[in-house]
Amino acid sequence: MGPRRRVSLPRPSRRGGRLLLAAPFALIAAVTVVDVLVPPDVHLGPFLIAAPAVTASFAGPRMTAFVGAVAVIAQSVVAVARTTFTDLNHTYQIVALVLISVIATFFAYLRERDEGRVTRLRSIAHAAQSVVLRPLPERAGPLRIASVYLAAEEEAQMGGDLYAAARTGSGTRLLIGDARGKGLDAISEASLVLGAFRVTARRERELPDLVRHLEAGVGSVEEDGGPAQAAPDADPAADDADEAFVTALVLDVPDDEPVVRLVNCGHPPPLLLRDGRVIPLEVSHPSPPLGLADVFSPDVEVEEFPYGVGDVLLLYTDGVVEARDHARAFYPLAERLAAWTGEDPPTLLGMLRSDLRAYVGGHLGDDAALVAVQRLAPDP
């Protein structure tokens, strides 16, 4: 995910645009020449209608009108060359060609207007997404960080997956999560969790307190910290269907200790790459996903794992491990990583992204986020 930028619709290259424009003019020339040379009882003039109709699919209203005018002139030349300009058959063909050109020009205008609206909407959406899901820093204290976001929806930069990092006085805190569902609802939940993390990650000294603030940010907990109460006439089944929750990993990496402390809220365990081995950091007491404190016990336990110089920690969402190939087999993340140990975070994620795309045939069924964090030797 890069910095904010203006987004525009893809347009044909200059060379490709010239080839497209050459097609209707070539059609007009070919039909005109052949129509003049064929016997009098053969009429190819109706084929000229295709020229403005095709042009309207890729060009603007001015070019469409110009092609239509050229087609009308060509039909007039054919009329003069074969009979007379006032010949009834050619007159009807010319009138029909004028009407089709006007209609094609109008549709070209509508298409160009709608494309402009879509371009502006995409630009606004991408700018908003880049504010919600900010790029992670490449360095945070003794850590080197790289991240990749793969959106399942075409043209999207963000879905329900999320990640963030924040520096504290003694180390770095990291967050990765996955909001339930897809679309705008998932993005809304993700933005709430990210906002809560950015506000409280530097302020709260203990991870359990930070996790409780994230729990409150999901939206199923009221401002006073108590469970939200359902309406008396609400349908319990509908409440369960609309329940919002976010699986998350919250990590604390101190600068001066070779450890990582984490709280797992129903999220896939991180993988530690060390000396050619891939080690899942499985916690013994996972916490419930954020937003389900009113359903499960909200107890939060922090667990600690060794994390030394040269170790790489891979955080990911379930869109990675639940990706399937054409045979419906899940992506073997740990097996793939075992062949790439020793790589730096940007290189590792680059290979992982390419391999994952190739494994699923270019289309992911769900959003996928990856964050690789390597502990470097302290600066002298």
Image (spheres, grey):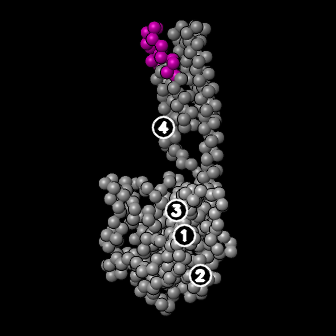
Side (left or right) of 358 relative to 237: left
Q: Which region of the structure is painted magenta?
A: 33-48
Q: Which residue has dot 1 on it?
A: 295
Quick check: marks 1 and 2 in contact, CB under 8 Å? no
- Residue 247: give x, y in percent of width and height: 50, 69
- Residue 329: give x, y in percent of width and height: 32, 59
Magenta segment: does it hold 37? yes
Discs 1/4, front? 1
Q: Residue at x 43, y 79 (%)?
A: 283
Discs 1/2, front? 1
**Marker disc for residue 108:** none
Which tag, 2 or 3, sits closer to the chain's start? 3
Q: Give the Cα distance between marks 2 and 3.
A: 23 Å
Q: Residues within 10 Å of mark 3 (few under 14, many from 20)?
A: many
* Residue 327 position by quadrant: bottom left
Which tag, 1 or 2, sits closer to the chain's start? 2
Q: Nearer the viewer, residue 183 or 126?
A: 183
Q: Give the Cα distance between marks 1 and 3.
A: 16 Å
Q: Which residue has dot 2 on it?
A: 209
Discs 4/2, front? 2
Q: Which residue has dot 4 on it?
A: 19
Q: Which residue has dot 3 on it?
A: 180
Farthest residue to the right: give it. Answer: 224
Magenta segment: does it hold 309? no
Discs 1/3, front? 1
Mark 1 element type? loop
Q: Residue at x 52, y 80 (%)?
A: 300
Quick check: marks 4 and 2 in contact, CB under 8 Å? no
